[in-house]
Amino acid sequence: MPSEIIYMCRRCGDLLSVEYNVDLMRPEIASNWVGRALSVWRYAELLPIVDRNKIVSLGEGGTSLNKCDRLGGYLGLKEVYVKNEGENPTGSFKDRGMTVGVTKALEMSMKRVACASTGNTSASLAAYAAKAGLECIVLIPSGKVALGKLVQAIIYGARVIQVKGNFDDALRIVEELCMTQPIYLLNSINPYRLEGQKTIAFEIWDQLGGKVPDKVIVPVGNAGNISAIWKGFRELYLMGLINRLPRMIGIQAEGAAPIANMIKMGSSEIKFVEKPETIATAIRIGSPVNWKKAVKAIRESGGLAETVSDEEILSAQKLLARLEGIFVEPASAASIAGLIKLSKNGLVEKDELVVCVATGHGLKDPDIILRQFPKPIEIEVDVNTLIKILSV
Ligand code: AN7
């Protein structure tokens, strides 16, 4: 029942997924979308909200899809695109899920919402809870959340609680909290959030004028987003709006790569990482709750997974900023680092249309940049000094 507060299947204990009446799965639905702005709610027919007048929105979605010719040229690839999710209201793709999830919390008359987070989920939930007038509780791993994200959760008025453990530990206890208290859980075990996030696929399809990418490259942490994007493409296919599907490519940081390791080994079992470690704190996750959905997305689509080192992540972050003017946070740069590695290994070919999903804004994590560069030079107010300096 859509009105029931439930996160896991009562029979098998697995996560749930939102499925729509087959009558909705027709190409004619898309004619409703044409007159609406590019945004999450352009695709309202395929979002699980009953009363559209009660939507909690901050203007999420409608992010740019940038054709990256300088990056493509550098890699010898013809059609590289970056979907810049940093343009969302709180600076990450999480807003797509929260507009749906927090609206759902209101539909269910919940007064309090909560999540565990590596940073972006908490920033996003805090903002949407503020807009909705709900009390927000966020649990974050002590000292492992990028400054910008922490600041966001604080200013939006969330109750921020640091847990002496990692994200996986924080998620475990917030799940327990929400099972026993009337608090609505908005981590990605909540299937409504993934519904909002699947609109990344719809927008890519719209922005490419109905073309389907050959490959979609996504950084993977808790593995909700890659699952959601795959669901989006599959729904377009079920509606008869596209006649082929992209290959889904998941990228994880070397020190937090249970899914990539499993896929690369062709294994049927996952080995969670007990002490995940990476500079990309957003994806510093060892036990991704959506792993089954993500593995299915990658395998069903004929895709693959790859790991990248912290060094590769930072160098891809710099490269994207300098070649394309797009500043993303380290976790997002993992998708670019993945593209670089795969193209070097011949796993992305010259003529393929590739879309990298850049999940969050670079300003979220300024410390990581300052640590890598010297302080800018300082001069007296004197034009001759300026000219002298510029000439060397
Ligand atoms: C920038 O905020 O898990 O694979 O708690 O912030 O759907 O988990 C963040 C994840 C990629 C991974 N890029 O997405 C959180 C959190 C950025 C992110 C991911 C996250 P999933």
Image (tube, helix red, strand yellow):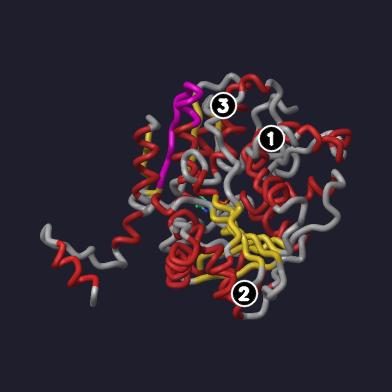
Q: Position of residue 224 (x, y in %)?
A: 62, 49
Residue marked by disc 2: 342
Answer whether residue 313 is visible to the viewer in this image: no
CA distance separating discs 3 and 1: 14 Å
Residue 347 percent location from the top left of the image: 67, 76
Q: Which of the 4 image quarters holds residue 184? A: top right
The mark closer to the camera, 3 or 1, is 1
Residue at 62% of width from left, 39% of height from top?
A: 193
How many numbered callouts? 3
Q: Is residue 143 visible?
A: yes
Residue that badge 3 annotates: 56
Residue type at mark 3: give it. Val
Q: Give the range drawn in magenta.
A: 128-140
Residue placed most toward the observer, 83 or 299: 83
- Horizontally, residue 357 falls left or right of residue 162, namely right
Give the residue at x 18% y 66%: 386
Give the residue at mark 1.
42
Say left or right for 57 vs 305: left
Q: Quadrant of the C terminus?
A: bottom left
Secondary element at image label 3: loop
Horizontal relation, residue 43 to residue 317: left or right? right
Helix, strand or loop at label 2? It is helix
Q: Which residue is drawn at 49% across and 42% down?
A: 121
Q: Residue at x 37, y 51 (%)?
A: 146
